[in-house]
Amino acid sequence: MKSVVIHAEGSVRVEERPVPQIQAADDVLVRVVCSGLCGSDIPRIFAKGAHYYPITLGHEFSGYVEACGTGVDDLTAGNAVACVPLLPCFSCPECNKGYYSLCKQYQFVGSRSEGGNAEYIVVNRANLFRLPSEMSIEDGAFIEPITVGLHAFHLASGCEGKNVIVVGAGTIGLLAMQCALALGAKSVTAIDINDDKLALAKTLGASCVFNSKAMSAEEISAHLNDYRFEQLVLETAGAPQTVSLAIDIAGPRAKVALVGTLHHDLNLSAATFGKILRKELTIFGSWMNYSAPWPGEEWETAARLLSEKKLKLEPLIAHVGNSESFAQAVQALNGSPMQGKIMLRLA
């Protein structure tokens, strides 16, 4: 089978690999149809951030069940599935509480084990979410990134009737923004430094968009005056300046969800820290995308929204190609962030 393999020197190659075989009773062999590159994959490729090399990445994929181990009785060949990449231990104190995202004894598809950027993959039954029959198989590759924002909403007790502000209009931010609109948010605001991303956010339904490179936090806050109460702010960009911005623009008693992963130290000014106190902000971290019962309501909600055609995915995609085309598009990044989703589409 063809597999897109990453080597330690940042080389992305299409190689022939043996089709993996079922080894355990709870294994499932999946024929991959579609797989997406995640922003977290970029340092694994170009900054020696993978657990081992050579490795096949890919934790955002969908496909069809090809065969099941003897212990799997709720899936059959031909079922459409999406990858649930985390495999928690299911036995630690965190797992017993249903805090699966916080398990410290976990495995992860496409990071700590081989991923879905290949024609076939064998995974544990717990790593698969069965897709509704009315849903496109290609859309299934977007379920995992969709659930990232939905997990933040889950931790915030929902977004219905709230003024949602998304700081960072990348793939995760734009998906979260669309979910908020579909789930009954009162308003949705997108903030970024890229005018093209903000224009896209506007076409996808954003109530307001602001360029934080062209406007100060004070100016943005003034424009948001009519939406200053019942705010839920999602920081999805993962940069020190956007974390500070999220706090600076948040309204009274707003909830601020930190979703993006920082790669540089965060130093808050005394004035920004003072706003946390004086505005009585609730700041919380949102890690991954799982809850009880496994894998969580986030996954059910994502599948429902996709089945109901409430989310527009095509405008978020920059490239779709076969193994060779996908490998070339990934290699061309050379460590830079994606400007749209890069997708692998297998025949």
Image: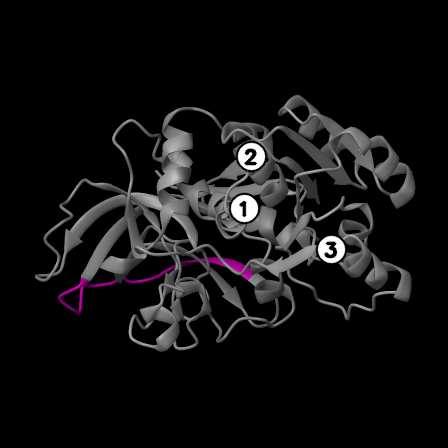
Does residue 335 appear in the picture of this structure?
yes
For marks 2 and 1, give the CA distance. Answer: 9 Å
Q: Eyeballing the image, is 101 above or below 33?
A: below
Q: Dot 3: what SS?
A: loop
Q: Nearer the viewer, residue 241 or 17?
A: 241
Q: Position of residue 98 (x, y in %)?
A: 36, 63
Q: Secondary structure at mark 2?
A: helix
Instruction: Mark 2 and mark 1 in contact? Answer it, CB < 8 Å.
Output: yes
Q: Look at the picture and state if 169 lies above or below 271.
A: above
The residue singled out by tag 1 in the image is 149
Q: Is residue 325 left or right of residue 76?
A: right
Q: Which residue is mark 2?
A: 180
Residue 179 coordinates in the image, percent (x, y): 52, 34
What is the magenta range?
Answer: 12-26
Q: Residues within 10 Å of mark 1 (few under 14, many from 20)?
A: many
**Mark 3 — residue?**
280
On whether residue 15 falls in the magenta region, the answer is yes
Q: Amino acid at mark 3?
A: Glu
Image coords of residue 344 (percent x, y): 46, 44
Distance between the alpha carbons at the discs numbered 3 and 1: 23 Å
Q: Is residue 227 left or right of residue 4?
A: right
Task: Give the quarter of the figure containing the N terminus.
Answer: bottom left
Amino acid type assigned to the residue bearing label 2 in the image: Ala
Q: State the predominant SS element of the stretch in magenta.
A: loop
Q: Is residue 216 visible?
A: no
**Label 2 crowding class (10 Å Cα cut-off): few <14, some 14-19, many 20+?**
many
Q: Is residue 27 above or below residue 163?
A: below
- At 44% from the left and 48% from the top, the residue drawn is 144
